[in-house]
Each structure stands twice: as structure tokens, then as C-alpha cells.
Amino acid sequence: MKSPEEFLVDFLQDCGTKKLDAEALEKAVHLVVDAMTLAKKAAPHAVVKAVESLTTKEAGGDRLARTWTTGERIPVSEAVLVNATATHAFFQDDTDMTAWAHPGSLVPMAAFGLAEAEGLGVGQALRGLVAGYATLNWLGAEEKVARQVVEKGFRASAVFGPIAAAAAGAATLRLDPLQTRNAIALAVDTAGGSLEPVRSGAQDWRLQNGFAAQRGAMAALLARAGVQGPPQPFTGKGGFLTCFTDGETPEAWRRPPQIAALKGVWFKPYPTLGDNMAPVVAASALTGKIPELSKIETVEIRMNAHFAEYPGTQYRGPFERTEQMITSTAFAVATLLVHGDLDYGDYGQLISDERVLGLVAKTTIKPVEGMDYLDGSVEVRTSEEAIRADASDVSRTVFFRDRKATRAIVERRLGSKSALDAILFEIVDGIEPSFDEILAELHKH
């Protein structure tokens, strides 16, 4: 019987050379477009600018990659850090609930950065991306591992992220089996990060994902250079399972990762905690339908019980920082009810919006055991009536985008003249764009 380490190494060996089918390529393009446009949009963010201020300017030599924020060529490890931090800056990057993590700010920049720095093609970067996403899903072990990680006070993205990024790097660089095993081991040994930044409304949860992606990319490069990690990073006596779980090997790790798992990754239409997404989408269905705010007596949110327990979701004020608003379920729902939309740039005004704050004070959250993660409802009550909407009332393309939905995202973030999505989708039809074409278009408008 193969060990989990062997299953993962064999899978990554296959991914590095595997011809991706059209369905996997299509989803991969949706994923990287989302990540790139989020990073570009977040370029002015204070945390992103702080990270960029510490990068190596006017770098020369080999292994350079461009940032998605400004297009500057810098050492690849630094580019991965900048791009991951920026993609995660709004907390709007995609979600894999099997792993309770956000692969969009962990994997694409590792695969694309390493491919660009090494002179490999976009097609190879997409192979790496698919490998990293599938690995992250596998690590979550159908939530068995992911839930234990979270219950112990760790952030799943910070724990799984270095490993997923290293997997992406190993497949992208086509490392040999020993190098691949060492890349995973080095990443496992650097995994970790607490939930406290999210719970407390701090800024540095962005850096958790940035550092995770960077460590994973570096693990792949170091493994190629001959650095060795432990042979059993997952199952060894002092390995991953001992540190982060009950020590038992999950059943899902007794088989290889699955590329088909990418189909379950969903997008976030609004910049708020993923746990809030279903009720916020439900609230969007009530736009223009609610009574005058002064007549509203209560707002009841029904959401998955585990989401309702996640740090930050129950927070109802006082609101002093953007990060507190981002995690609060009541705040996000109230914003949609009042304004019908939510953009990251709105938070500066929303923090003192009396209409939104007034609804937050009238809001209660009802946890529902067994409710699907993408289900949720919002009910607005007055003395005379109750108006309710469910997340299922809204098209599922808000979570699982088609090309039309991704086109709308590009227009919203980059402007109507951007053809970034069209250029990247050409690869599904067999026409591989260059990094120069893609990044020139990203920074054109």
C-alpha cells in the first residue's frame, strides 16, 4: 500500500507532463483571471505597498518574474509574495471548502511566477496550477483534516498553502521524484499560521497567504537545488498529522489527489469572509424589495452552523477597521440590503454609515446544522410582513463562473477595454499566449 507521500509525489509527477482536458483548462483559466485581476485591483492597498517597498528594485540576472500589481520584474520569490498578498488583500479570492482554504492566493502565483522565471510556457504554468489546486483539496481530506486544523486554532490557508504552492512548483518545474518529495517535505516543515488575525480584525492575515505561497515556491527551488527534507513529512512521528490533527491517516489520503476536484472551487462575488458569502448573496436578491429601513424590526440570517462559529463572523461592532467589517456576517448582509452591492473601496464610507449600522443592530444569526455551505437565507421583518430570500434564488454563476461571468469580473476590475480573459481563454482552443501578452494586457488599462 502506498503512503500518502507516495500518492502525492506520483500525482505531481503525472501532472507535470499531463495534457489537460478542455474542462480542466477552462476552469484553470477562470481561476487565474480571478487571481490576476484581484491582485491588480489591490495594487494601492497599504499592506501590498508595504510588501512591495521591501522588494529588490532594478533586479538583474535570472529567475525574475513580474508582479501582477505593477508589472515590475523582481526575483521570483518576491514576486510570488507580492502577488499572493495582493490577491488575498480584499479577502475575495476563491474558496475550496473541502480544505477550508483560499487556493487563489496560494497557487496561481507560484505556478505562473516559476514558469515565467524559468522561461517555461503558460501551458506548463496551468499544469502546475491544476496540480496545486488538486493538492490543496486532497490535503483537506474531505474536511476531515481541514476541520481539525481549524479547531486547533490554525488557519487552513496558512497550513495547507505552502504545501499546495510547493506542489504547483514541483509540477511546473517537472522536478524528479526525489526532488518532488523534498519540495513537499520542505513546505510541510514550514506550514502554520493562527486564526487570531482574522478573529481580531488585524491586517496580517494577508501576509499569511503571501508567505505561504512564497515558502512553497522556494521549497520547490530549494529541492531542485538538492536540499533534503524528512522522508515522511505527513506520517512521520513528528510530522504533519501529529502536529495538526489527531494523528490518524485520513481515508482520503489513501488515494491520489483528483483533478476533478477543481470543479468544486467557488468564486466570491463580494469582498467578505467566505463564510458570509451565501447569506450575502441571498441579501442581494432582496435589492429594491425591502421596506423603508425605519420600518424594519428584525433581520434574521440563516447560515451553516460551522460558518457561524468561524472567528469574526458573529462580530457586530464597534467597527474601527476594515478588517472587522470584512469578517462580520451582519455587516456584509446589512450593506447588501441597504446598497445592493459591496466593493472593497466602499468600506471607508461604510464604517460610519448609520443605515448599515442600524440594520446590523437589528440582525440575528441562526446557525443551521447541516446547511450546505452555499446555502443561506435572509429574512427582513416589519410589524406587517416578512420578506425572505435564499442564496439559491440567485444564479449559481456567481459562485461557478461561465465565460460571461468572468468577462463581467474583468470589466469591473480592469475596465471594459481589457481583453485579458479572451487572451487566456485562447489556450483552451489550442493557442498558447505568452507571458508578455498576458501581463501587457493586465497592465494596459
Image (cartoon, rainbow, N blue to C red):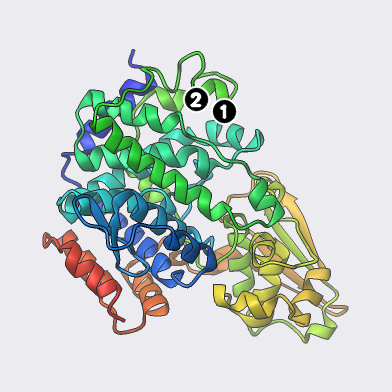
Quarter of the image for residue 26 reads bottom left
Label pair 1/2, CB-CB below 8 angstroms: yes
The percent position of residue 92, horizontal first and vertical second, equals 51, 62
Q: Is mark 2 on a helix, strand or loop?
A: helix
In this rendering, the answer to whether 110 lies above or below 319 is: above
Towards the viewer: 282 or 70: 70
Towards the viewer: 39 or 417: 39
In this rendering, the answer to whether 418 lies above or below 208 is: below
Q: Which residue is drawn at 18% across and 66% down?
A: 436
Q: Which residue is drawn at 50% across and 13% down?
A: 237
Q: Quadrant of the C terminus?
A: bottom left
Identified by mark 2, the residue type is Phe
Please give left or right for residue 385 compared with residue 10 in the image: right
Residue 307 in view, yes or no = no
Identified by mark 1, the residue type is Phe
- Residue linked to disc 2: 240
CA separation in Å, label 1 and label 2: 6 Å
Disc 2 packing (10 Å; few <14; some 14–19; many ≥20): some
